[in-house]
Amino acid sequence: MPPNALLNAAVPLSWYLILSAILFALGVAGFIFRRNIITVFMSIELMLNAVNLSFVTFSYQFRQVDGHIYSFFVMVVAAAEAAVGLAIILTVFKNRATLMIDEVNSMKY
Amino acid sequence: MTVLFFLVFAALAVFCAINLVVQTHPIASALSLIGVMGSLAVLYLQLGGEFIAAAQVIVYAGAIMVLFVFVIMLLNAGAEAATFQVSRFVKYFGVILLAAFLGLISFIIQGALPKTEGVIFGAFQGTALDVGRKLFTAYLLPFEVTSVLILIAIVGAIVLARKEV
């Protein structure tokens, strides 16, 4: 393959979607495996980012900016969620003095 | 050049995402998440999302992650305890299931997507002008509802963070 072919080649659209799926799956893994409540929260942000990538990719596919607007709304919701969620984490820490989700289980019993 | 950029930043994003999941200290996870967001901003730019790339860096990597890092430092969160009491079934079978899920999704995506032309940088530019025009005409109502949502979030955060809860 001549070097110019690689430089001028187009990226298949599916690669972006597969990258999005990989990031989403990693976010799910972090959500399931981590015990620190802040890391769990960051995994949720990772999932939101992965979905945003899908939105922007489909936006390119259809040559419309609607996908950009959807991902803009996702960002806004993520900002609101981060503000409220971190306030909840602060309250939990104030009442329980722990950040491990396994120790915040008094609803279980 | 587009392929090269995609591969470099996709690899960076996946590496940072794996790092986010495997690191035990929240600060390391937060820095990895910023790496993911920066790489994704480059990919958005490649897909013609100028406005979204800028918003990604400013809102996500700027504002939201500063909030995260602030809370981590405020709570003085240390590394997770090593006592990982997840059953071995979950630990190994979960990883296998995740990999199978990914393979299935990739297969479906490859098969279902029509064979269109690939992404070439500059073929489509969703400029801030286009985004703004659509946002304030077709999506005006959702935009206004969003501002109400932000207001509710601010009030909720203040109520939650009060002294006597």
Image (spheres, helix red, strand yellow):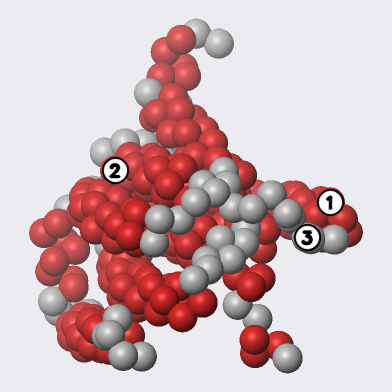
Q: Chain of mark 2?
A: B
Going by the numbered disc 1, the residue's amino acid type is Tyr
* Marks 3 and 2 on same chain: yes
Q: Residue at 58%, 66% (x, y): give it.
A: A100
Residue contact between numbered discs 3 and 2, judged by CB atoms under 8 Å: no
Q: Which part of the image, by quadrant, shows the N terminus of chain B?
A: top left
Q: Which x, y percent locates residue A37?
A: 53, 66
**Between disc 3 and disc 2, whose residue precedes?**
2
**Residues at marks 3 and 2, CA–CA distance in whole angstroms:** 42 Å
Q: Is residue A101 above or below residue B138?
A: above
Nearer to us of marks 3 and 2 is 3
Q: Which x, y percent locates residue B136?
A: 13, 76
Determine the image quadrant of residue B23.
Answer: top right
Q: Chain of mark 3?
A: B
**Between disc 1 and disc 2, whose residue precedes?**
2
Q: Residue at 33%, 85% (x, y): give it.
A: B160
